[in-house]
């Protein structure tokens, strides 16, 4: 059966099934960039070198008997696995992937799962078997999924390398293998692959200001060894700690703070399978479970502050971390006033992982991201790559020459030009502007490009523009960020209408366009604001000037607040 047709047919039913699917693609290896590396072990595998270490500690009675993974949902279901159980179950997962599915070292596994325990098992299984996992958000639509399959396949639109499909669900589906059944039947013994430190471990799709998402490749070193280097310098978790990260499994934040960071320290990762974001559920969970550290985007805390916090007590919560978008000063102040706890910011990106942070022992400075982690040389640079003195505005960059730091990604897959283009002098450009103070704290001033950061989601304007252009009413469109008191930023679209639609009810047309975008791409990307215009500002070469629209939008908002 032609795969393209088959995929489209399946996606029509993925509204129900999608939270429990993963797909495998097998392709060729890609040579990593030769930038030079710091001293790292030649071989490293997080599953055998970290997870199995804690399993051995448990067997020897040298770790407390608490869980390593604690999962609950809203129906009263609960899963508790210690490191010994995680080790055995992930070895079973590796056997399913390598033996039943016949996957080989270097093969790629696209994982589209919601916050179910199997996500953690599949990722560990991939690591053990030397497979490359590609996390994807469950909010993806047909077009998003197809693009990712074709992008990693890089052969033809019918995805000829797709050979295995696994379903994680209580129900069966024709053409899909039942992962849960295969897991129960698999051996608990698996010989972990001795993967190279610089060997590919994961590929994350990250949005850009133009075109479709890029594929950021991470090695076993940039994920696992970096986590070991970060330990004690950020969340500083202890083996008795329980940390809850509120994040989609498709984002690297989930990988960092509900997988690598806690398990490196022997701590427990807590997961609540929230089908939708519900602040009341979050407050009840924090009141009922012994969670002492929480990680969430600023919008999580802003939404919690809209509730009556006086009705809740958090007896165990001690540390709250936040990042992914701008933390507004009033959110920091109100959270501290109502809970007695500080919000400790962190900063990074898919390509670099954790870059700056306010650790447990550091002073919190409102409006500041903290200092750079010790193994990253982060500086504010000018347009020629020269380091600027403290107090001077410039672009944030990480020094990658002459030595590429551990934790830095391998490069954009099949896009060496784009990788190199993002280097200025000796620095990798973070795409943000900021200031460094005398204490080494960084202040974020805004994006240096057109990326929209809404509620922690990075949204490329071109993705939204392309979706809008598929509607017959749209002749031209430009998408920018617009300030929002809750989400920090929201997507706003300026739309030039086809003359045939000028007489339509604009309020109704706005709703129609918003719904259209939700159906075409991931729902979180839809424009919450739409403004109909007669034309768009352009350069002499005909390029739409998003920056001019964005500047006008933000100035208009500032003027409105001042009145």
Image (tube, rainbow, N blue to C red):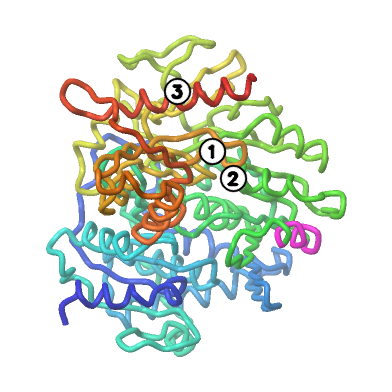
- The image position of residue 17, as x and y in percent, is 43, 77
- Residue under label 3: 433
Which label's residue is closer to the chain start, 2 or 3?
2
Q: Which residues are magenta?
A: 281-289
Q: CA distance from mark 1 to mark 3?
A: 14 Å
SS class, disc 2: loop
- Residue under label 2: 297
| In the displayed structure image, the side of residue 25 where residue 180 appears, left or right | right
Q: Is residue 398 visible?
A: no
Q: Quick check: 356 above or below 558?
A: below
Residues under numbered marks 1 and 2 in contact, where contact means CB atoms less than 8 Å apart = yes
Please name whichever residue, 308 or 62, is drawn nearer the observer in this view of the structure. 308
- Residue under label 1: 325
| In the displayed structure image, the side of residue 319 where residue 186 appears, left or right | left
Please name whichever residue, 193 or 103, is drawn nearer the observer in this view of the structure. 103
Residue 289 occupies quadrant? bottom right
Q: Residues within 10 Å of mark 3 (few under 14, many from 20)?
A: many
């Amino acid at each position: 059966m032609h795969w393209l047709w088959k995929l489209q047919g399946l996606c029509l039913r993925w509204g129900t099934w999608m939270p429990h699917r993963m797909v495998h693609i097998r392709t060729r290896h890609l040579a990593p960039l030769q930038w030079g590396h710091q001293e790292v072990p030649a071989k490293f595998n997080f599953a055998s070198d970290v997870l199995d270490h804690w399993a051995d500690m448990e067997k020897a009675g040298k770790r407390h008997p608490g869980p390593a993974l604690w999962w609950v949902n809203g129906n009263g279901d609960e899963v508790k696995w210690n490191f010994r159980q995680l080790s055995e179950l992930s070895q079973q997962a590796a056997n399913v992937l390598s033996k039943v599915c016949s996957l080989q070292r270097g093969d790629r596994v696209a994982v589209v799962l919601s916050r179910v325990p199997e996500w953690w098992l599949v990722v560990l299984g991939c690591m053990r078997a030397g497979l490359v996992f590609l996390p994807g958000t469950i909010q993806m639509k047909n077009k998003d999924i197809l693009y990712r399959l074709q992008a990693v396949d890089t052969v033809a639109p019918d995805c000829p390398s797709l050979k295995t499909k696994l379903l994680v669900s209580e129900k069966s589906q024709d053409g899909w293998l039942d992962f849960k059944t295969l897991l129960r039947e698999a051996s608990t013994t698996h010989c972990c692959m001795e993967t190279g430190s610089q060997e590919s471990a994961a590929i994350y799709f990250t949005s850009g200001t133009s075109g479709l998402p890029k594929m950021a490749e991470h090695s076993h070193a940039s994920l696992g060894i970096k986590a070991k280097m970060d330990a004690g310098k950020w969340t500083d978790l202890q083996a008795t700690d329980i940390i809850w990260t509120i994040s989609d499994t498709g984002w690297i934040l989930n990988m960092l703070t509900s997988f690598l960071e806690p398990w490196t320290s022997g701590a427990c990762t807590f997961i609540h399978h929230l089908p939708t974001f519900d602040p009341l559920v979050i407050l009840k969970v924090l009141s009922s479970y012994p969670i002492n550290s929480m990680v969430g985007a600023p919008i999580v805390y802003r939404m919690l502050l809209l509730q009556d916090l006086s009705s809740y007590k958090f007896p165990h919560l001690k540390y709250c971390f936040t990042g992914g978008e701008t933390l507004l000063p009033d959110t920091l102040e109100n959270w501290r006033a109502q809970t007695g706890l500080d919000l400790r910011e962190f900063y990074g990106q898919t390509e670099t992982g954790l870059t700056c942070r306010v650790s447990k022992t550091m002073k919190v400075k409102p409006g500041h991201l903290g200092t750079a982690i010790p193994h990253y040389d982060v500086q504010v640079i000018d347009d020629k790559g020269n380091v600027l003195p403290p107090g001077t505005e410039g672009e944030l960059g990480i020094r990658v020459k002459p030595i590429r730091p551990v934790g830095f990604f391998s490069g954009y897959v099949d896009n060496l030009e784009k990788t190199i283009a993002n280097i200025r002098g000796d620095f990798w450009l973070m795409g943000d502007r900021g200031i460094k103070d005398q204490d080494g704290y960084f202040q974020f001033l805004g994006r240096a490009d057109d990326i929209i950061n809404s509620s922690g989601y990075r949204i490329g304007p071109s993705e939204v523009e392309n979706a809008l252009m598929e509607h017959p009413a749209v002749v031209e469109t430009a998408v920018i960020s617009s300030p929002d008191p809750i989400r920090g930023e929201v997507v706003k679209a300026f739309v030039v209408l086809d003359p045939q639609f000028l007489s339509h009810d604009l309020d109704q047309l706005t709703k129609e366009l918003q719904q259209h975008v939700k159906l075409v791409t991931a729902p979180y990307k839809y424009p919450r604001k739409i403004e109909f215009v007669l034309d768009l500002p352009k350069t002499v070469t005909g390029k739409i000037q998003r920056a001019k629209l964005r500047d006008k939008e933000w100035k208009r908002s500032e003027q409105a607040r001042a009145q």
